[in-house]
Image (tube, coloured by chain):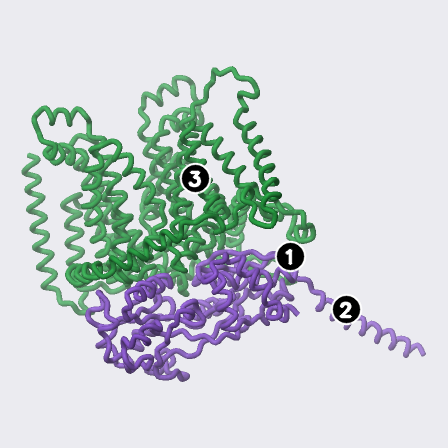
Amino acid sequence: MNFSKLRNKMMAGAIALVFASIGTQAWAKDSSKPIVIPTHNWSSQVVMAYVIGGIFESMGNNVEYKPADSQAVYEAIRLGDITISHEVWQSTFGKSFYNAMAKGGVIDAGTHAAPTLEEMGVPQYVIDDNLCPGLPNWEALKNCKDVFSTADSGGKGRWLEGPQSWHGDLMPVRVKALGLEDDYVVKFAGGADAIWAELASAKKEGCGIITFNWTPNFTDAEGFVFIKFPGYTDGCRVVDGGDGACGSPNGWLKKAANYKFPKTHPAAYTAFSKLSFTTAQIGQMAALVDVDKMSHQDAAKKWLADNKDVWMPFTQ
Amino acid sequence: MNNISRHLQLTQFAALLVVFFILCFAIDPSENNILWRLPAFLAAVPEMLNSSVEYAMFEWMPIQTYNPEIEDYEDSALLIEVTRSISRAVLFGIELIREILVGGQKTIVAFTSWDFVSENEWAVWPALPWTVVAGVAIILGYALSGRWLAILVGCATTYIAVFGQWEPAMETLSFVLVAAPASVLLGVFLAILAFKFRVFESALMPLLNVAQTMPHFSYLVPVTVFFGVGDHAGAIATIIFATPPMIRLTLLGLKGVSPEVLEAGMMNGCNKLQLMFKVLIPTARHDILVGVNQVIMQCLAMAVIASFIGAKGLGFNLLLALNQLRIGQALELGICIVLIAVVLDKLSLGWANKQIDYFADLSFSQRNKYPLMMAAILVLGVLLASIGSLIFKNEINYFYLIPHNQGITTENFWQSGVDWMVENWYASLQAFNKGLIINLLVPMKNAYLSMPVAATFVLVMGIGYIVGGLRSALVVGGLLLFIASTEWWDRALITAYMATFGVLVSVVIGTVTGSLCAQNSFATRAILLLCDTFQTFPSFIYLIPVIMLFGVTDTSVLIAVVIYATIPAIRYTVEGLSNVPQSLQDAGTMSGVSRIQRWLQIEMPLAFPHIMLGINQTVVFALFMVIIGAMIGTDDLGQLILKSLSDKHGIGNGLMLGLCVAFIGLAVDQILRTWAHQRKQALGLA
């Protein structure tokens, strides 16, 4: 009798404990301190920042936006000055991301659905006007270095690569490995702006130009064709022990967060880790600003209102 | 006598050049030849620097703090706690001003908590209607300096509001209103210390030299590590950038106070404090004001760079617009930055020039005329805004806040202008571009790169010796040795080549334009205004059209360099020429010289030392812009400085690279300054 009473009591206590722990887990409230979202200098990223901020706000969180340099931001996330980053491009920011991760303090919060490609390519009209017959196959490049030559390329064709901080000597190595070094040189641009400016003026003049670019990007709208290099295989790059004669892999677009984020804002973190956008969705966000000329905040509001069925599931 | 020494100097120069060229041809360009390139003794320093900073920040004097939010102890360190509390203080100041202007809730949070603000929806400070801020600024302008300033302020604020840039402009203003006074106070304080204590002065001077020649990009990473990312980091980087000229000019002013004034103060029984604040500083007012003007210019010149590390406002929006190639929008934002600079400059000038009328016997309403008017403006503005909310029911209330980019815009006009330029000029400029690169820039770059290190040392130290004796030779030699012992000597040579080219072109354009404009007082004022404008106008805006016309080439970088570096060359030429004593000019005219002769034989030689200081500034400006040229695409030190933003050893690399650039500037500075000083003495000006 006594014993069973005691057992009953113990059972009840255990059940209560279990419930209590479930309760605290389900009710663990997010801190009211703001989640700091960085804004960089390109449209889709800024709109997405406001979209994600809107999602967090709908869950009752406070949000703050801070402008930051897209390379320096990972150090800031590591130290907790910024909470998340929602567009970590493999080849442009992968290095900074992993550097910060190695030092500790940054966690990988999952990958967007959007498949990305970051590769050398040419604007659509270069193909349409047949400026270099045989493109986008890379071997066609051998016969049309003059189409892509510039004032300072010394008679060779020029590959306009992004800043060296993006992927180091990857492209010069590739030019050499493909046996193109007598015909092509690689020029490092100072930033994305410089590439867009060159693309714009080349388009006006209808000249040939090879630049580094990525998709999804606003250039998709006008058409941009990536050059088909020999396929990427594991270990084909020089750093991985290969000869470097291969193109870029299909890349990822990741999300990063400060290591404390899951603990301070468990609900928001869960939503953030579930959050995943497709190429089309990222394109819509950018188009609202780039094509419809809306402000970034308004674009985000409109997107959130129009796509409730997309983002609501993330919050549940 | 003078002639002989001059001939001697020329012979020395000729001999030096001969030795230099012999060395260039004699030294074998192989990597192992120590005369060709020095081994990189300092290659390990950036990493050491980096790890020591990180040790100091994150490991030295560890502190464990309990973080209730993650229910765990966190490892922290003393230094990071100290720097972060400085950050919080600066941020509080910025947000207080910002929220008075455009509303918000951070200040309320500072006194309560985020929980409180989340629970109480009313706890948001409302923004002031733009009409109120503009009205108060206009009255301030009128009170400080009269009708014309009031009109200027009115135009500027209306422009900013009507063009839909009110919020970013106020965000920028709020961080400038913290950074500028902080720089001025810090500058005056350090200058007083330097004035009082010789030891402090001699310790401070080299630091100032480095701070003024070091490109701002190179200390962005250290600032973010020490102070975090955000408006406060932007403000702190701005303070580092803006304080040195303030210190220098204040010190100059204090030293220039004549002993008679000082003695008069002492005779009146001033104590030390009174002597400083009632006698010395008011007397040195002119130089201090030039310093304040420089601080304001520097602060707004940093508006764009500061947004790299988290400053909100015009700078960030400008970069965003440029990334979309919306040059028209960027231009409108750039004009806002210039307008804020002009308004702040004139207001501070008016305030400093205001004399207190000790004898006026005024009634309460007369004494408090302006505050009362401001209060009236507040009431009126709020009334207008509420009427506005009735008129524009579901639209934008134009009397309250015009949202960002919803005002009128001239974007399409500028955009079509740029398009027209690219369409019509591109083809013809291409030939020029190609010719310049193939015939001049590439050979010049190669010539610089083919200099053996020994020959460079002989040339530069030789010039130092001829101009300033052994001391100068050793100073420039030491600076050069530092650069040569890093692994970046070749890159430094490329930086030097671009800076040299930029400086040569800028000096020619600057002295000619300056001389022409100095002939006429109207032109003088106009060109000085233009100089002020271009000094604060963000260079990023013209980088984009330049890239469209000239591509990612050295030409683009050099055009940007010339546009920026011509400013000091013009300014100092104009100032130098207008300070030539009228009596000397009259004497020349009486002796029957022609205008050209007068310019060549009298004005130029007399203004020459001042112009040399201008050239000195031109070198610094050119180096700055060569580094910013990395945003276009260069393969010099700047490229690596930009890269250090994402490097593993970013702090160490950034600082070392910054020092390399600074030392190039300081070596030139050493030679030019010594020379200018000697010329001044020879002319009896110093």
The residue to which callout 3 is attached is B156
How many neighbours does mark 3 have within 10 angstroms: few (below 14), some (14-19), or many (20 or more)?
many
Residue A186, position as x, y percentages in the image:
28, 71
Residue B96, position as x, y percentages in the image:
55, 43
Q: Is residue A298 above or below residue B281?
A: below
Could you tell me the amino acid type at mark 2? Ala
Q: Point out the image quarter for the C terminus of chain A.
A: bottom right
Left-right relation of B300 to B678: right
Q: CA distance from mark 3 to mark 2?
A: 62 Å
The residue to which callout 2 is attached is A20
Asked if labels 3 and 2 share a chain, the reply is no
Residue sitting at x 81%, y 71%? A16
Could you tell me the amino acid type at mark 1? Ser
Q: Nearer the viewer, residue B4 or A144?
A: A144
Could you tell me the amino acid type at mark 3? Ala
Colour chain B is painted in: green
Left-right relation of B421 to B31: right
Colour chain A is painted in: purple
How many neighbours does mark 2 have within 10 angstroms: few (below 14), some (14-19), or many (20 or more)?
few
Left-right relation of A157 to B176: left
Residue B472, position as x, y percentages in the image:
20, 46
The residue to which callout 1 is attached is A32
Q: Is residue B260 above or below residue B303?
A: above
Residue sitting at x 27%, y 77%? A132
